[in-house]
Image: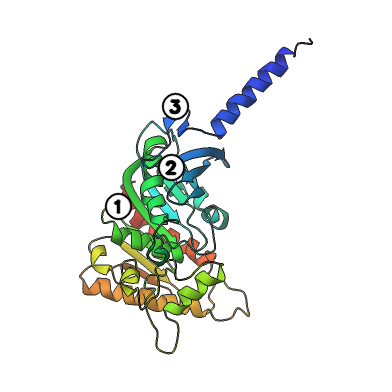
């Protein structure tokens, strides 16, 4: 039998080793613990940039796999130290790659000393364990993020216990709802054009029906998330940041939003954005509640601006000093 050349054997061995680095199994990667208490585990890793690492997690909370993108700090080594973490949450109909695709987050020098966590949250997952008409079950996005992802990152990827969060639109909702429902989990939160009061009914305008229409537009059952806004109002209130404002008392909060009129980043002829105008009303209502509680947020209600990424990148820059101060970086 013809023997393979030594070079071919070496190349084959290297490829096998590389596959072992990029694809993990049995909750282990390079000797690290990459599993959570409920059995969620990393099944693949992919290096997608100089400091970017994508994880694929097999999640019991979701009943499927989901992804997390990590922007690693300078000198990052999973077992070297516990790094402070900034969670960046994406908006509706988007995904875990949005922040690095649409913003300059990966180029910011101020984030070279923190681990940035960008988890998948479903097109309309709403950072919630779905009510599912009272039956519960999957998807459980809240459990996925705050239990499974947290445990995996702390055990295998160098995440520490100092955390802050920022998000846009649905992600702004997620940052504030998680902070209110789990006091102490985040040290500060920021929301950009966030859905911060989904129960708000504007006379003659938008109300909770917009939420139902949005979920329906993505092919999902709109009543599976929190139920009916009237019959299951208690479920809605249990997630609505404005209704939970008391739990945000004392927490550094940054709120920003445009008024829906085209602004400096919008080309000529851009129409008014009714949704952004509605979100501004939601944010004004939450800010008023926090001020009434003696815990005024930092606000940037900047006037002209629609529901688009150039504004959210700018607001990330404006809120980072507050977020990083809370992290101690």
How packed mark 1 is, by other alpha carbons closer than 10 Å (few <14, some 14-19, many 20 or more), is: some
Does residue 114 appear left or right of residue 220 in this picture?
left
- The residue drawn where x is 32% and y is 63% is 253
Residue at mark 1 to residue at mark 3: CA–CA distance: 28 Å
Of residues 45 and 100, the one nearer the viewer is 45
Residue named by callout 1: 185
In the rendered image, the vertical position of residue 167 relative to residue 8, given as above or below: below
- The residue drawn where x is 44% and y is 62% is 171
Residue at mark 1 to residue at mark 2: CA–CA distance: 20 Å
Specify which label sits upstream in the sequence, 1 or 3. 3
Specify which label sits upstream in the sequence, 1 or 2. 2
> In this view of the protein, can residue 256 be seen by the observer?
yes
How packed mark 2 is, by other alpha carbons closer than 10 Å (few <14, some 14-19, many 20 or more), is: many
Residue named by callout 2: 40
- The residue drawn where x is 42% and y is 55% is 141
Residue named by callout 3: 31
Residue 95 % position (x, y): 53, 56
Of circles 1 and 2, the one toward us is 2
How packed mark 3 is, by other alpha carbons closer than 10 Å (few <14, some 14-19, many 20 or more), is: few
In the rendered image, the vertical position of residue 26 relative to residue 228, given as above or below: above
Residue 255 % position (x, y): 37, 67
């Amino acid at each position: 039998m013809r023997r393979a050349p030594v070079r071919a054997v070496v190349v084959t061995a290297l490829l096998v080793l590389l596959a072992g680095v990029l694809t993990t199994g049995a909750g282990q990667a390079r000797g690290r613990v990459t599993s959570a208490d409920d059995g969620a585990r990393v099944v693949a890793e992919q290096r997608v940039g100089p400091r970017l690492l994508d994880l694929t997690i097999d999640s019991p909370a979701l009943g499927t796999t989901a992804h997390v993108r990590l922007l690693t700090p300078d000198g990052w080594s999973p077992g070297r130290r516990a790094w402070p973490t900034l969670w960046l949450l994406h908006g509706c109909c988007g995904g875990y790659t949005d922040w690095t695709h649409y913003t300059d987050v990966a180029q910011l020098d101020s984030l070279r000393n923190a681990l940035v966590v960008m988890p998948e949250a479903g097109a309309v997952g709403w950072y919630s364990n779905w009510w599912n008409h009272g039956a519960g079950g999957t998807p459980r996005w809240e459990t996925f993020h705050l239990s499974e992802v947290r445990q995996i990152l702390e055990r295998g990827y160098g995440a520490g216990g100092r955390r802050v969060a920022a998000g846009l639109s649905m992600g702004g909702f997620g940052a504030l709802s998680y902070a209110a429902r789990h006091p102490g989990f985040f040290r500060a939160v920021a929301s950009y054009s966030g859905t911060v009061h989904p129960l708000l009914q504007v006379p003659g305008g938008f109300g909770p029906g917009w939420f139902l229409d949005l979920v329906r537009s993505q092919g999902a059952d709109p009543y599976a998330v929190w139920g009916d806004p009237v019959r299951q109002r208690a479920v809605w209130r249990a997630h609505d940041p404005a209704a939970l404002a008391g739990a945000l008392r004392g927490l550094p909060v940054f709120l920003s939003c445009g008024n829906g009129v085209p602004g400096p980043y919008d080309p000529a002829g851009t129409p008014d954005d009714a949704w952004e105008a509605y979100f501004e009303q939601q944010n004004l209502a939450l800010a008023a509640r926090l001020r009434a509680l003696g815990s005024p947020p930092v606000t940037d209600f900047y006037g002209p601006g629609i529901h688009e990424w150039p504004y959210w990148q700018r607001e990330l820059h404006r809120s980072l000093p507050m977020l990083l101060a809370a992290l101690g970086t």
